[in-house]
Image: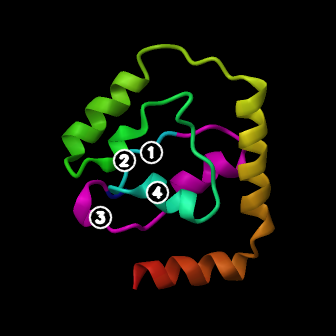
């Protein structure tokens, strides 16, 4: 929904959907979004993707790196599946009330 440095750190349902389904993810979003997710206790996938896109403030540069990430097929290992499962469990461990409070707090 939002990309680049001026987007803030608002994490949308488009991020939480693959997490809740137990899938690896790559995000075209606000600068620092992966860092924010890590701080929230989620694991990202540097073994699958070049995550340097998270550091760029230019949406064009972010998109270039993300598209380069998608050029080659990825091998999903048992370790990656375990990481996906931990992310899914972490997502569902939090109560809906806590999630909504955090989203509102971060947005405001």
Rendering quarter of residue 79: top right
Residue drawn at point x = 55 percent, y = 27 percent:
48
Q: CA distance from mark 4 to mark 2?
A: 8 Å
User: Disc 3 or disc 2, which is closer to the eye?
Assistant: 2
Tell me whether the residue at label 4 lies in contact with that at label 2, contact meaning CB atoms closer than 8 angstroms.
yes
Residue 53 pos. (x, y %): 34, 41
Q: CA distance from mark 3 to mark 2?
A: 13 Å
Q: Quadrant of the C terminus?
A: bottom left
Q: Residue 47 versus residue 14: which sits nearer the camera? A: 47
Q: Which numbered marker is on residue 54? A: 2
User: Disc 1 or disc 2, which is closer to the eye?
Assistant: 2
Q: Which residues are magenta?
A: 3-25
Q: Is residue 19 above or below residue 76?
A: below
- Pointer 1 or 3: first along the chain: 3
Look at the image and say whether residue 8 sits in the magenta stretch: yes
Local crowd size for mark 3, using a 10 Å CA cut-off: few (<14), some (14–19), many (≥20):
some
Residue on which disc 4 sits:
35
Residue drawn at point x = 67 percent, y = 38 percent:
23
Residue 8 pos. (x, y %): 33, 68
Q: CA distance from mark 1 to mark 3?
A: 13 Å
Q: Residue 90 versus residue 11: which sits nearer the camera? A: 90
Residue 103 pos. (x, y %): 52, 76
Residue on which disc 1 sits:
27
């Amino acid at each position: 929904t939002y990309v680049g440095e001026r987007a803030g750190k608002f994490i949308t349902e488009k991020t939480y959907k693959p997490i809740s389904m137990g899938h690896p993810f790559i995000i075209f979003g606000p600068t620092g979004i992966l860092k924010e997710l890590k701080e929230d206790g989620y694991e990202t996938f540097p073994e699958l993707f070049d995550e340097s896109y998270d550091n760029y403030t230019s949406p064009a540069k972010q998109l270039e790196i993300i598209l380069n990430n998608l050029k080659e097929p990825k091998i999903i290992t048992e370790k990656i599946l375990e990481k996906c499962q931990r992310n899914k469990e972490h997502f569902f461990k939090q109560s809906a009330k806590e999630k909504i409070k955090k989203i509102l707090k971060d947005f405001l």
